[in-house]
Image (tube, grey):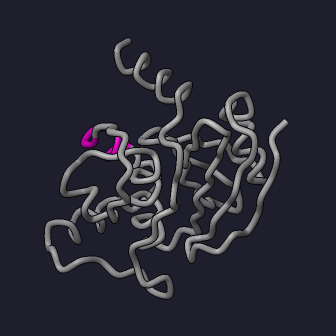
Amino acid sequence: MKILAIILILILTGCTNTIVPAVYTNVEEPSLPDDPEFVELVQTLDTPYKICLYLNNEFLYKGNTEFPNPYEFWLTKRGDCDDYSAFATLVANFHGYETYQIIMCSKESCHALAVYVVDGKLNYSNFGYYRNTQVTTFKEVVLDGGYRLKYDYFIVYSYEMEIVETGVLP
């Protein structure tokens, strides 16, 4: 019950006023820091679901105005939505998944999601919670989470940090 209350607070309040989608790797070939423990962990987290289970069990939400890279996030085990999203997309991309980050914003706040292409469909994670939505458009991802009630627009970034879509929410 306590976890559900925390999740609801985070969803209703958003993460931060500004979000800069994070990328930490060579986008042509995902690279990892020279830390055997981190590399071994990344190698074991070979599906989006496993990544999310790990995030959910090992990390704590902590709003911040800093933009640590996924390795620094792993070291501290604390971060906000863009840190979770950047870590998840790094690890999933390392395993060959096509990944995206969706940033949704209003005048008051922004929020980030990690998106994974699985069998040609879009699934996403919000912090460490995996949603097997099997939808086909980024707008459907945003609408699935009910984010239209809080945010005015969204921007989708590829793993290479190129804007691939923008949209206004009803």
Position in image of residue 47 (x %, y %): 44, 57
Using residue 60 as the reference point, say whether residue 169 is left or right of it: right
Please tell me which residue lies in front, 135 or 4: 4
Instruction: Reply yes or no: does residue 81 show up in magenta.
Output: no
Q: Quadrant of residue 55?
A: top left
Q: For the N terminus, which image quadrant?
A: top left
**Height in image: 129 above or below 36?**
above
- The extreme top residue here reads 1
Name the residue at 75% across, 40% down: 152
- The extreme right residue here reads 170
Name the residue at 37% across, 59% down: 67
Position in image of residue 124 (x %, y %): 58, 48
In the image, which residues are magenta? 53-59
Please tell me which residue lies in front, 52 or 107: 107
**Height in image: 29 above or below 16?**
below
Using residue 66 as the reference point, say whether residue 129 is left or right of it: right
